[in-house]
Amino acid sequence: MPRQFFVGGNFKMNPVTRDQKRVLIKTLNDATLDPRTEVVIAPPSLYLIPVRESLREDVKLSAQDCYIKVSGAFTGEISAAQLVDAGIPYVILGHSERRSIFGESSELVATKTRVALDAGLSVILCVGETLQERETGKTQQVIEGQLKAVIDVTKPEDWSKIVIAYEPVWAIGTGKVATSAQAQETHKATREYLAKAISSAVAGATRIIYGGSVTASNCKELSTQPDVDGFLVGGASLKPEFVDIINSKK
Ligand code: PEP
C-alpha cells in the first residue's frame, strides 16, 4: 500500500489573537486542497475546540503536546484522555522545543507516546539532531536513540498510529532547510532502522515526514524524494503558502 502524503501545520504559540486565528482558518476553508493528502493542523490547545467548530471537516486537528496522566493535580497540563474526549485525533510529541526548552527526555516522550496511543490518539513523533551532532557524524545515532525509547514501549501494531517527523534542530525556524538529498538520506536510513528494530512491514508502512524551514518554494523538490512522505510545517503554516505546501504533490 502506498503511504498517504501527510502535511501537518504546527502553529506553536501562535497566533496571538482570535481574529488572526479566524483569518488562518478562513484561508484553509477557502482553499482547494489535494484530497490525496492527509492534512492536520496543531493550533494552541486554547483554540482546539473553537477551531474544530469552524474548520472544514477534511482537515484534522492535533494537540502540540499532552501529559502522561489522565487527570489530577498537574497544573497547566492537558491529558490524552481530554483530547480524545474533545474529538482531537492527533498529538505532536517530542518536538525539539519540548526537548530543549522544557527538558523532555526521550524516555518521557516514549511514556507520553504510550499513554497517547492507549487513550486512542495518533502521534506525530518528532526526532532530529542538532547541528553539532550532524557535524560530528551522530545524526543516525541520535535519531535511533530517540526512536528506540519509543520502540521499547510499543508493539508493531502501534506504528500504524505513529507518523515520524524528522526535524533537524538546525533547520527548525532558521530558514536553513535540509537539502532534498540530506532529507532523503536520513529518511532512508531511518526506514532501514525501523525494518531492523521492528519489521520490514512497519518500515514500509510508516510515514516519515520532514520538518524544518519548509516553504512553498522548497516543498516541491523535497516531496519528490521517495522516502519523504510529507511535511511538518512551523512558520509557513501561519501563511497562505501553507496551501501550496499541502498541494506540493499536485
Ligand atoms: C516545527 O517547529 O515543527 C517546524 C518545522 O518549524 P519551521 O517550519 O518554522 O522550521
Image (tube, helix red, strand yellow):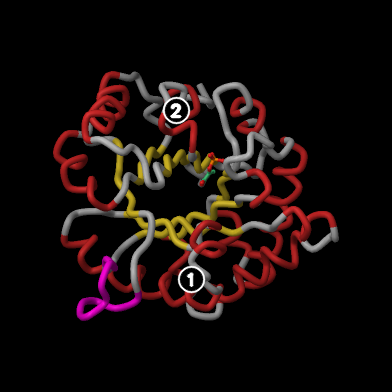
Expressed as whole percent of the image width and height from the top left, the position of residue 102 reads: 48, 66
Query: Furthest residue to the right?
Result: 136
Would you say the magenta stretch is mainly helix, strand or loop?
A: loop
Q: Residue at x 42, y 56 (%)?
A: 92
Q: Report the magenta residues as a range.
A: 68-78
Expressed as whole percent of the image width and height from the top left, the position of residue 74 reads: 27, 76
Amino acid under disc 1? Val
Q: Secondary structure at mark 1?
A: helix
Q: Please state the total of marks drawn on the protein image.
A: 2
The one nearer the camera, 25 or 87, is 25
User: How would you rate the neighbour count of disc 1 (Cα within 10 Å): few for under 14, some for 14-19, many for 20 or more?
Assistant: many
Q: CA distance from mark 1 to mark 2?
A: 28 Å
Give the side of residue 20 with respect to residue 127, left or right. left
Identify residue for label 2: 242
202 relative to 104, above or below = above
User: How would you rate the neighbour count of disc 2 (Cα within 10 Å): few for under 14, some for 14-19, many for 20 or more?
Assistant: many
Q: Earlier in the sequence, mark 1 or mark 2?
A: 1
The image quadrant that residue 174 belongs to is: top right
Q: Secondary structure at mark 2?
A: helix
Identify residue for label 1: 109
Magenta region includes residue 231: no
Expressed as whole percent of the image width and height from the top left, the position of residue 249 reads: 53, 26
Amino acid under disc 2? Phe
Give the side of residue 119 with respect to residue 35, left or right. left
The image quadrant that residue 226 belongs to is: top right
Q: Residue at x 48, y 64 (%)?
A: 159
